[in-house]
Amino acid sequence: MSEKYYVGIDIGGTTAKIGLVDSYGTIVDKTQVKTQKNLKWEKIIDSFIKPVEDWKEKGYSINGIGIGAPGAFDKNTRMLTNCPNIAELTNVPFVDYISKKLDRKVIGDNDATCAAVGEHVFGAGKKYENFVFVTVGTGIGGGIILNNKVYRGKDGYAGELGHVIAVPDGRECNCGNKGCIERYASATAIIKTITDGIKRGDVTSYSGVNIEDIDAKMIFNRAKDGDIDSINAVDTACRYLGHVMGSVVNLLNLDAVIIGGGVAAAGNYYIEKVDYFLKQVGWISFCKNLKVLPAELLNDAGIIGAASLILEDIKHQ
């Protein structure tokens, strides 16, 4: 097979999704492997690369392997320095280990940065030189593209948008700080606004709903149908995120803000609200041509984004 292919490994706390991607961003084959946290790191990694070895044996010409993981990747040591969900992979040379075993170029990065690169190579960011990608789900993450290249900062940790302070001395965050935007604008935060309101008696429109069944999708659907409690919860989250992103736009003078993750799947309803609140803070001259867009890669963003690390690297060699 003369065509070049790229492997994306999207490592999660429960499973790793592994895909074979062609030069057009199409996933040719994919699988997933359970993340076996009870094993030594070499055994965990061996289970992730077994499908890649199988693809090589079938004759696929693999040009490199990209890895995305939920943690902080040090670009100098090529190791994860923080990965709370998979402690076994912290501060171990698994990137170099994979490269040696497969005799291929391997690049690892934070999963949100991978998603940003994927959007730049194959998705909503293809035609933009400067944008910030923000993923909104259980938490909030991000990636930065500046001057057509991924911006990683001095050590590779840039893009932690979820831990920009939105409310000084506000809610405690898992990172140890108080007032991070993640605590006010994530899906978790939106659910908390409703469930706390129910417990206080302020939210009355959810009577008859089991509190354990309330998720972000339910809240968004109710907001679209005109439920005032749900509208207020979504508006509050969008206001916090929009104001923070407006400040980011003022700092970086971007072409676009691209929003992905589970909450962004709510579509135009959510995107338009973030856009509205962003432009309350972003300077008029900076926002005149600014685009606020939904991500395009969605369910396969992890695989395609990780594989895109190799394509992005080749482009800038």
Image (cartoon, helix red, strand yellow):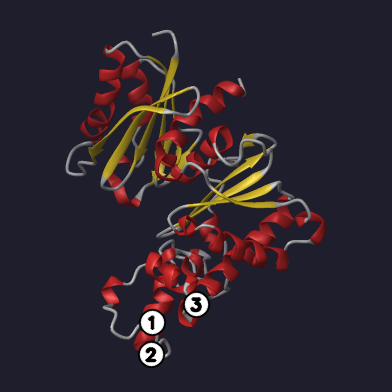
Give the vertical position of 234 relative to 309 (above or below): below
Looking at the rendered structure, which numbered label has been put on residue 307? none
Number of the front mark, 2 or 3: 3
Q: Which residue is mark 2?
A: 200
> Is residue 228 something that shows in the picture?
yes
Residue type at mark 3 is Gly
User: Crowdedness of circle 1 by 10 Å Cα count: few (<14), some, many (20+)?
Assistant: few
Where does the N terminus fall, quadrant-wise? top left
Residue 219: give x, y in percent of width and height: 41, 71
Q: Quadrant of residue 106?
A: top left
Q: Which residue is mark 3?
A: 226
Q: Residue at x 58, y 36 (%)?
A: 120
- Alpha carbons under labels 2 and 1: distance apart: 6 Å
Do the residues under discs 2 and 1 have CB atoms within 8 angstroms?
yes
With 304 as the anchor, is 31 left or right in this view?
A: left
Direction front: furthest residue:
225
With 91 as the anchor, is 116 left or right in this view?
A: right
Q: Which residue is mark 1?
A: 196
Q: Residue at x 45, y 12 (%)?
A: 3
- Choose the circle earlier in sequence order: 3 or 1: 1
**Total count of labels:** 3
> Is residue 108 something that shows in the picture?
no
Residue 202: give x, y in percent of width and height: 43, 90
- Alpha carbons under labels 2 and 3: distance apart: 22 Å
Residue type at mark 2 is Arg
Q: Secondary structure at mark 1?
A: helix
- Choose the circle earlier in sequence order: 2 or 3: 2
Residue 227: give x, y in percent of width and height: 46, 79
Q: Secondary structure at mark 3?
A: loop
